[in-house]
Image (cartoon, grey):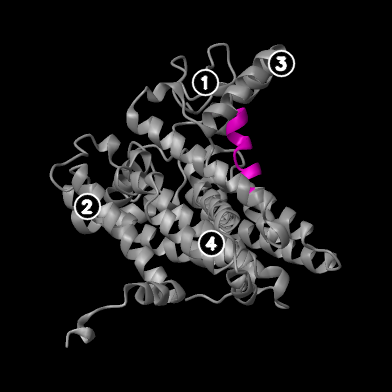
Amino acid sequence: MFRGAFVNVPRVIRRWCHSRAAVIWTAAVLAFATRIAACFALKIFASDPWVDPWAFGWEYGRIARWLVERGIFSLDGIVPTSETDPLYSFVIAPFFSLFGTFTMAAGIAIVLFQILLCSLTTWAIFVLAEKLYGPTEARISALLFACYPGSIFFAVSRIGPTPLSILLLCLLFIVILDVPNVRRFTPAVLGGVLAGLLVLTTGHLLSLLLVIPLWLFLVSKGRQMRMAVASLLFVGTATLVLIPWSVRNSVVLGEPSLSKSNLDYHLWVGNNPNAKGYYVKDPSHAIRARGENSPPYYRMAFSWIAENPEQFIILTLKRIKYFWYKTPDRGNSTGELLHAWIFLSVVGLALVGVIRSGETFARVNLPLLFIGIFPVLFYVTNPSFYRHRIQMEPFVLILASHGLYRLWSTVVGSSGEDREVSAQRIHGTVA
């Protein structure tokens, strides 16, 4: 009598697992829900957490204010600056125009925008993991990212470019993975546009102009000339995207500059007699004082390194440790320690995924190269919190998803069905 009222739960779960669209939507909704829940838990919507305008987007918010009020890219509304990556300040500015400068309404609107970017990123991670490995890892990766503490933190507790840069990075890798498999050079050009936007969003990602051509070279067996042309188109297009802002910066500085201009300062902060292996602002100099009295940071840093090579090596080893774990200045808070160990656990699973990559290793070389090359800048300057490391953590999650799958297959055995489906869908289209 009531047989029709019962739901076959295992069957529903199987149908959900086999539905690409259902999993993507689930991950996107889960990402949105967890971040909204975090907003309420942290009372983001209950009180104004940005009483101090400096904390409202940090430099990005201050510059956005003057973009709206005076139409000038400046930290103080008077002197033009090149200290900060430009793109996110231009993203914040429309919110200030609509909701007011440094208002609670503007803050909530920007946080909701960042949360939506994270939801969209679950789709991008799904597609990228599917291209790298297959449908099983795609599902695991998307769901892991939806609940990943680091992503949640930077979406709701910081107004900054992190959610946008992660989405753009995923889109870039999705596009670049198609370069060796299509006859046209459209993916290389589109990848160059995305790379240029990424550098304007986060200047630390300039290393992508090395990572992508290097990967194309590694997969160019028998197609060296074609991959060389693709690399030139990629770098050339990215450069064209950067040229307008580079010209502007060069006019402001009176010297050539691409995205922003404080590398010399951070090199000195990381390599001086008082350096500790993580970011400690040097009190003897204001950051990037300009004009005739601007300290010669490059010369000071290189001189100290040449005179203290052993100390430089020790500091570099410390910086590697702090980049992958946590910096001493973050204290002994339970939350910081928990996040550090969650990330180390993910790294462990990622190592399993890399070791057990098998036939997918040529494709996995792309995120591996990025994970290997991107941190080098911080190994020689200074890691700050984990706001830089978060840029590559989604790709560690993708590698970890394959590690989880391989461990599960080892423990319970595998019918091979997933691998067969994976082979058929390894170049799956966007949902």
In the rendered image, the residue lying farthest to the left is: 46
Residue at the disc numbered 3: 309
Name the quadrant containing residue 332. Answer: top left
Residue type, mark 2 in image: Ile
Structural distance between the alpha carbons of marks 1 and 3: 28 Å
Q: Say which label, 2 or 3, has the lower sequence index.
A: 2
Structural distance between the alpha carbons of marks 4 and 2: 34 Å
Residue type, mark 3 in image: Pro
Structural distance between the alpha carbons of marks 1 and 2: 41 Å
Start-end of magenta stretch: 370-382
Q: Identify the element where label 2 is drawn.
A: helix
Foreground: 115 or 292?
Answer: 115
Residue type, mark 4 in image: Glu
Question: Of tags 1 and 3, which is closer to the observer?
Answer: 3
Q: Are marks 1 and 4 in contact (CB under 8 Å)?
A: no
- At horizontal 63% and vertical 77% (from top left) the residue drawn is 424
Residue type, mark 1 in image: Asn
Q: Are marks 1 and 2 in contact (CB under 8 Å)?
A: no
Residue at the disc numbered 4: 137
Residue at the disc numbered 1: 293
- Would you call the spot at circle 2 few (<14 residues within 10 Å), some (14-19), or many (20 or more)? some
Quadrant where the N terminus is found in the figure: bottom left
- At horizontal 52% and vertical 17% (from top left) the residue drawn is 276
Foreground: 123 or 237?
Answer: 123
Q: Are marks 3 and 4 in contact (CB under 8 Å)?
A: no
Residue at the disc numbered 2: 108
Q: Identify the element where label 1 is drawn.
A: loop
